[in-house]
Image (cartoon, rainbow, N blue to C red):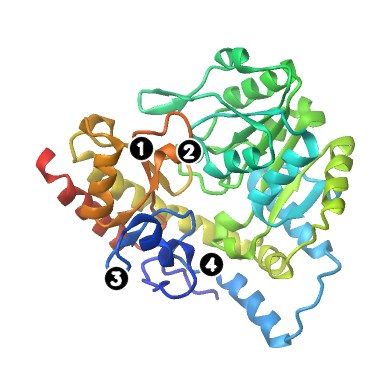
Amino acid sequence: MTTAPNFDETICRSGTHSVKWDMMEKLYGVPAQDGIAMWVADMEFRPPHCVQAALEKMCAHGIYGYYGDDAEYLAAIQWWMANRHGWNVPAEAIFTTHGLVNGTALCVDSFTQPGDGVILMTPVYHAFARVIRAAGREVIECPLDVTDGRLSFDTADWAAKVTPRTRMLILCSPHNPGGRVWSLAELRAVADFCKAHDLILVSDEIHHDLVYPGHKHTVMPLAAPDIQDRLVVMTATTKTFNIAGGHSGNVIILDPALRARFADRMNALGISANSFGLFMATAAYSPEGAAWVDALIAYLDGNRRLFDDGVHAIPGLRSMALESTYLAWVDFSGTGMTPTEFIDRVQKGARIAANHGASFGLGGEHYLRFNLAAPRAQVAEAVARLQQAFQDLQ
């Protein structure tokens, strides 16, 4: 019998080449000795035992050669998508990339040309804009609305931003950093917009396993089955199971013509998979992995409630209600402070490193993003520090 996960365990990651902890002081000025790292989107939890066992088996064998015969790996992906998302994926549609930032870069490279425009619904995961600009493409920002503390959009407002050189829209579904699980109607609206303006739709669904009770994620191929000729879906085990260091992700393309274009770029750039990531993904996409995810969601649900209650006790602060992800999106605009002022209180007063909202694009200027995937005691300590740092408002 597999031992139940202990998400309350405190695991010291300092000095382990963890970007989240070992770069915190350099990048945020938050002291390493007693700071709390709540920025990078990885978790403070061990992955399921089946993943650790797969790596231990590799190490025990002691040979680290090229990976071959991916039938078991592909079957694990197919099993997971069918059983967890109701989506039957043909094996030939699955590509493996070095994570989904790499997958995004390959999509931009495969389906656009320098000078072309790519639409982002901002604020959104900051790596998208970085990759697009580095590739010599134009970032077209379509800011999301905040209605009753919840992100929303109107595709009619986006049309004016489309130019003759706009070629692609990247959708973050579920949304990072806002935690929205887009409704079926909203997904359909995005698909229709892409059809109307002849855009490739790249749907980044890396957080689709991390959805809270009362909400349901729909994969884009099921929401809009008629747009397969322009649809690319990106998924990964990395966020779900806390194995981001394995740098493995899947780009899934159902249309043969799009698939051929993507395969050409993969071949031209010499992209091949990391065997460590493949072994971990195969082990994770299993019944044991599924049970671990269910336990994780229940634990994270408790963390988000604790965090939201504590933050909402501070006048002027509002944490957007999470429907998915473990990333709290906190609005500081009600304090009347400038970003410099509230960031100083969080970093210097509370000694917490959180992502600056402006890095996510238009609409993020008065926000910070906090990672809640940590032992509950750490989340409670962060809440106490924030309340102390803003005690003059209470």
Tell which of 214 and 163 is nearer to you: 163
Answer yes or no: is residue 394 visible. Answer: no
Q: Are marks 4 and 1 in contact (CB under 8 Å)?
A: no
Query: Which residue position is annotated with label 3?
Result: 33
The amino acid pointed to by label 4 is Pro
Q: Position of residue 113 (x, y in %)?
A: 77, 33
Q: Are marks 2 and 1 in contact (CB under 8 Å)?
A: yes
Q: How much space separates mark 3 and mark 1, taking CA atoms?
A: 26 Å
Q: Position of residue 209 (x, y in %)?
A: 57, 49
- Secondary structure of the residue carrying tag 2 is helix
The amino acid pointed to by label 3 is Gln
Q: Position of residue 387 (x, y in %)?
A: 18, 48
Q: Position of residue 216 (x, y in %)?
A: 54, 37
Q: How much space separates mark 2 and mark 3, taking CA atoms?
A: 28 Å
Q: Earlier in the sequence, mark 4 or mark 1?
A: 4
The amino acid pointed to by label 2 is Phe
Tell which of 55 and 76 is nearer to you: 55
147 displayed left or right of 119: left
Query: Which residue position is annotated with label 2?
Result: 360
271 displayed left or right of 14: right
Q: Earlier in the sequence, mark 4 or mark 2?
A: 4
Q: How much space separates mark 3 and mark 4, taking CA atoms?
A: 26 Å
